[in-house]
């Protein structure tokens, strides 16, 4: 039996503190946490439609409309009809949106760098590499391997 804490048990308080540190930065830029997530997804070029965006950032597609409205009104994104499906909207980050997202990210990461500086350099680099590797895993690879998930799968198969 191991004496270390569970990953979620260790990461959750850290995540909550990181979010609390981000809130004033986001407020200064007049962007919500969800708005920042939208700008990030669009700046990375990973989404095209509102439905794909909602899935990419883990938001409810009906609740994201208000966020998109605010970002569009601020000139940070555009939503244009998809020529192949007039019901769908193609989302694009504007130059101003890209500039704001990068400014916010720089401020957030400056605080993260201050925090990471508490670790020895080798640990800092190892921590970031490990976190990036885990971040790239599909959600199913994280959740499907749990003992509870295996028990639920076995019950369904009976």
Image (cartoon, rainbow, N blue to C red):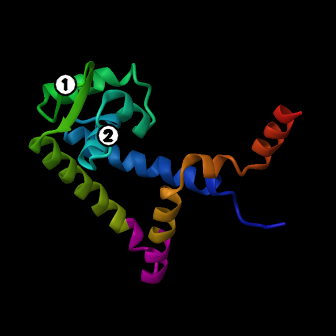
Q: Residue at 11% of width from left, 32% of height from top?
A: 75
CA separation, marks 2 and 1? 16 Å
> On screen, 95 above or below 90?
below
In the depicted view, which residue is nearer to us: 109 or 49?
49
Which structural element holds mark 1? Answer: loop
Per the image, the residue denoted by label 2 is: 47
Q: Quadrant of the N terminus?
A: bottom right
Q: Residue extending furthest front?
A: 84
Picture coordinates of residue 146 (x, y %)? 73, 49
First in sequence: mark 2 or mark 1? 2
* Count of numbered badges drawn on the protein: 2
Per the image, the residue denoted by label 1 is: 83
Q: Residue at 19% of width from left, 41% of height from top?
A: 29
**Crowd around label 2: few <14 · some 14–19 · many ≥20 (10 Å):** many
Determine the image quadrant of residue 117. bottom left
Per the rendered image, the range of residues in magenta is: 115-127
Q: Residue extending furthest top?
A: 87
Picture coordinates of residue 155 (x, y %)? 86, 34
Look at the magenta stretch and give its main secondary structure.
helix
In the image, taking residue 136 as reference, residue 47 lies left or right, namely left
Which structural element holds mark 2? Answer: loop
Q: Residue at 64% of width from left, 52% of height from top?
A: 9
**Crowd around label 1: few <14 · some 14–19 · many ≥20 (10 Å):** few
Q: Is residue 120 magenta?
A: yes
Which mark's residue is nearer the viewer, 2 or 1?
A: 1
């Amino acid at each position: 039996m191991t004496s270390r804490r569970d990953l979620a048990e260790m990461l959750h308080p850290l995540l909550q503190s990181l979010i609390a540190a981000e809130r004033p930065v986001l407020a200064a830029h007049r962007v919500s946490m969800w708005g920042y997530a939208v700008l990030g997804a669009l700046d990375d070029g990973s989404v095209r439609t509102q439905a794909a965006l909602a899935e990419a950032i883990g938001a409810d597609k009906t609740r994201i409309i208000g966020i998109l409205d605010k970002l569009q009104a601020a000139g940070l994104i555009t939503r244009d009809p998809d020529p192949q499906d007039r019901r769908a909207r193609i989302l694009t980050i504007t130059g101003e949106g890209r500039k704001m997202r990068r400014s916010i990210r720089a401020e957030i990461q400056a605080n993260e760098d201050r925090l990471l500086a508490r670790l020895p350099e080798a640990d800092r680099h190892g921590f970031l590499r490990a976190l990036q590797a885990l971040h790239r895993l599909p959600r199913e690879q994280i959740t499907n391997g749990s003992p509870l998930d295996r028990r639920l799968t076995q019950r369904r198969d009976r």
